[in-house]
Image: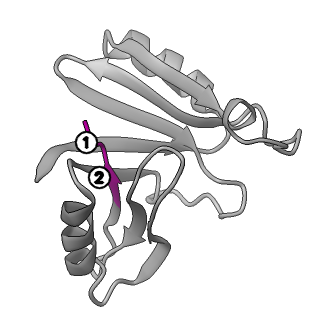
Amino acid sequence: MIKALEIYLVTDGNGKEAVEFYKEALNAEVISSLTWGEQIPDCPAERAHLLMNAQLKVGEQRLMISDENPDFDYKHGYNMTAAIIVDSVMSAQEIYSKLSQDARKIHLELQETFWSPAYANLEDKFGMMWQISTEVG
């Protein structure tokens, strides 16, 4: 079952600055903020400062922000995605199978990550960017 549909902003190396900006502009509360260096063992020094994920509470909604993965080219227009938060791996699989049909690009196939038992990132057949993330419990 879908738990939430959220906005995910992707920045070009200035994610921490964006967190502070949106915190002030939207009167948001920073729930969490983690860098690559804090999360990835043996992270290369040039990536350690990059924002892996920040979560802000804006009213009753969650806004997520991260810096683009340096392995991908940052492109304007690809810097906002919809994040579908589901409550089970089965729900993630079901949604992934539908959204990935005729997808323009699968950036990350549905798989277990250290933050989610089932996560995927893709550009659907209409060019819309989607993240699917599972939060159990």
- Quadrant where the C terminus lies? top left
Whether residue 134 is in magenta: the answer is yes
**Left or right, 20 with reference to 9:** right
Q: Which residues are magenta?
A: 131-137
Q: Residue at x 56, y 60 (%)?
A: 75
**Left or right, 82 with reference to 76:** left
Q: Residue at x 40, y 84 (%)?
A: 104
Q: Which residue is mark 1?
A: 6
Q: Position of residue 73 (x, y in %)?
A: 66, 63
Q: Residue at x 42, y 15 (%)?
A: 30
The residue sitting at the front extreme is 137
**Which numbered circle lies on residue 82?**
2
Q: Secondary structure at mark 2?
A: strand
Q: Residues within 10 Å of mark 1 (few under 14, many from 20)?
A: some
Amino acid type at mark 2: Ala
Q: Position of residue 50 (x, y in %)?
A: 70, 36
Amino acid type at mark 1: Glu
